[in-house]
Amino acid sequence: MKATGYVRKLDHLGRFVIPGSVRRSLEFTDHQPLLIAVDGDRIILEKETPRCAVCGERATEDFAGKHLCVECLAGIGRL
């Protein structure tokens, strides 16, 4: 993990601002959907990416209009 040196306080609604330089370096767009995860006492923010319709892992392929991961797509090929 790379420390940025930025410290932000939460407002009364629990919001904080991600600095513009961080958003630009991560190529966040306006209204970027973010996935929020908790790992112990850490909050992890990730760009929301399509999830596999079968197993829920990150999807990398489209099949018949559905997002699938490589493993599930290979499983369909074996049917």
Image (cartoon, rainbow, N blue to C red):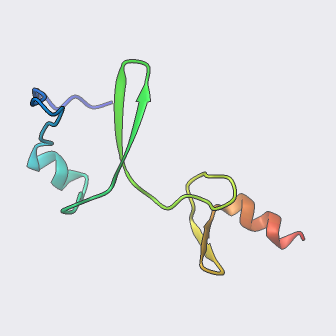
Q: How many marks?
A: 0
- Where residue 5 appears, as percent x and y from the top left, is 12, 27
Q: Which residue occupies the extreme front position in the image? A: 13
Say left or right for 9 vs 75: left
In the displayed structure, 67 sits above or below 20; it is below
For the C terminus, the quadrant is: bottom right
Say left or right for 67 vs 4: right
Where residue 32 sits, quadrant-wise, is bottom left
Say left or right for 50 vs 56: left
- Where residue 71 appears, as percent x and y from the top left, is 73, 58
The structure residue drawn at horizontal position 12% and vertical position 41%, both measured from the top left corner, is 17
Q: Which residue occupies the extreme right position in the image? A: 79
- Where residue 51 appears, as percent x and y from the top left, is 55, 58
Say left or right for 79 vs 41: right
The structure residue drawn at horizontal position 25% and vertical position 52%, both measured from the top left corner, is 26
Q: Which residue occupies the extreme bottom position in the image? A: 64
The structure residue drawn at horizontal position 18% and vertical position 51%, both measured from the top left corner, is 23
Where residue 62 sits, quadrant-wise, is bottom right
For the N terminus, the quadrant is: top left
